[in-house]
Amino acid sequence: MSQRPLVALACTVLNDLLGSRLPKSMPVDWMDISLHNTPKKMAAALQERLDALATPSTVLIGYGLCGNGLVGLKSGPHTLVIPRTHDCVAIFLGSHQRYVQRFFANPNTYYLTKGWIDAKDEPLTDYRDYVAQFDEETADYLVEMKYKHYRKLCLVGFSQEEIESVRPAAMEIARFCHERFGMVYEETIGTTELIDALVAMPADVAQAPSDAFLVLAPGSEVTAAMFHWTGDAPPQPMARKENS
Amino acid sequence: MSQHIDAIKDFVIRGKKNDAAEAVRQALAAGTDAGLIMKDALVAAMAIVGQKYSSGEYFLPQMMIAARAMTEVIPLIKPHLIGVAAEKKGKAVIGTVQGDFHDIGKNIVRMMMEGAGYEVVDLGVDVQPEKFVEAVTKESPKFLLMSALITLTMESMRRTIELLNAGGLRSKVVVGVGGAPLSQKFADEIGADFFGEDAYVCVQSCNQRLA
Ligand code: B12
């Protein structure tokens, strides 16, 4: 049995974090970050890329459930490995459990990462885009409506060096968010645990199942229930041994 | 008469708040029925805006700007509604669930419900199940409307319904749920009375249950 090729399909928010860790030879398909604004179109956009793969592959998916955006994604001839998290914030914090804990302790936190800053998906760029597209008064109104409920702006970095390199840009956003909405800036070190485990995934994923990941065998479809961690959620489907 | 209505509707769809306000003043001065302006111009405009958002023609800011235009002209119309025997359809309590701060959709639902003649008590964002129950006890609303945009937070709707059951309040209120990640299936699973795809559907679902 020949090994299936390993490829990755991921959101650009993970460009640095995942991109720098994957072997240079691994084909990666980066998806535009703005897809997260339209979860209802996410599965179709990813499906198109999966269907375009020439050979049955093991695909590392750099997405969480993302507002049910992944629901309906079909593995087809491929095996998909997906972090079992609700969104990328959990990926940055290293686990579903850590995210849930942090999230409900401080739900009024707006998270910032180098990935979001690089992709220009943060409140200050948002404001500048609105000024350019509409006018200042309208832009003021739009950001007020969007961000006024948040009390904290939290930069998640992955090393002291990274935090220091991103800090100037983060501080500019923080000043804006503080002046307008009274948000308090804080920094936290995330962990690359989940990303590292995803990168370490062998092509024969059946050898390394872990409840931190969803392994979707060929011929299956993503459902929301696969991401449930507690209660009566149906058990995660086992990876099928590919071929024999 | 109907060109006034058409003009207001068009300004709201395009988010032109000042033009919309001017058109409303003219319409009222010309004797156009305030209830008609509300229903056929404002609520109808936001229904179209909702469709444009779903189809991808409008993005979030266009939708928010249209909603702002509607919010700004409602106070011009309200005083006239009272004289015209505003139809009082009953009370609704609305809020975004615990842990969730997404309220753009919830605010549009509130506005459309108000536009349709409901009295709405808005509990805001990050509303705990206990707070919803408390409001149901205090306000005795006909409808309880919960909104969630995060798959982590939608679970708290289940908890609210459990608490309503435990308090013997469930049969006293119609529970409607909505928000982008929700579905009819989820609503059935948690025992809600209806799921609404958008604000317009929410109003229709409530209207249906008035009889
Ligand atoms: C705009 C937005 C924001 C804005 C919110 C502004 C605000 N004041 O609401 C900002 C930028 C601040 C934001 C913040 C965050 N967000 Co956000 N956000 C969105 C986005 C892009 C659109 C939501 C929206 O407003 N849509 C427009 C409105 C009009 O639509 P709607 O809400 O669905 O409402 C309509 C219908 O659903 C219905 N409806 C709504 N409520 C009800 C209720 C009833 C009873 C009925 C019948 C109908 C009904 O009628 C409405 C009008 O027609 C969504 C993606 C998506 N799902 O579309 C992500 C999304 C919801 N956010 C997400 C995330 C992760 C976050 C953050 C954690 C990000 C961060 N960096 O920290 C924080 C959240 C913190 C928190 N605790 O709340 C994720 C959630 C993932 C998940 N786990 O489920 C999403 C899905 C994006 C993604 N794919 O990753 N966000």
Image (spheres, coloured by chain):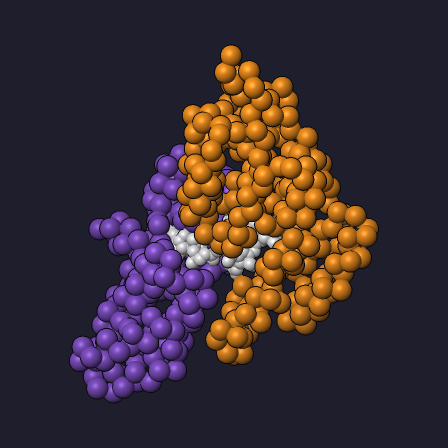
Q: Quadrant of residue B112?
A: bottom left
Q: Position of residue B190 (x, y in %)?
A: 42, 36
Q: Position of residue A46 (x, y in %)?
A: 47, 42
Residue B85 visible in image = no
Point 24% across, 51% down: residue: B208
Report the residue that reaches farthest toward the top: A244
Specify whether A38 is left or right of B211. right
Q: Position of residue B144 (x, y in %)?
A: 40, 50
| Chain appearing in purple on the rendered image | B
Who is closer to the viewer here, A189 or A60?
A: A60
Q: Is residue B56 above or below residue B62?
A: above
Point 66% across, 55% down: residue: A112
Q: Colour of chain A?
A: orange
Location of the N terminus of chain B by quadrant is bottom left
Q: Position of residue B168 (x, y in %)?
A: 42, 39
Residue A66 visible in image = yes
Point 65% across, 58% down: residue: A118
Q: Is residue A132 above or below residue B199?
A: below
Q: Quadrant of residue A164?
A: bottom right
Point 77% across, 54% down: residue: A163
Specify whether A190 is left or right of B34. right
How many numbered tags mark residues here? 0
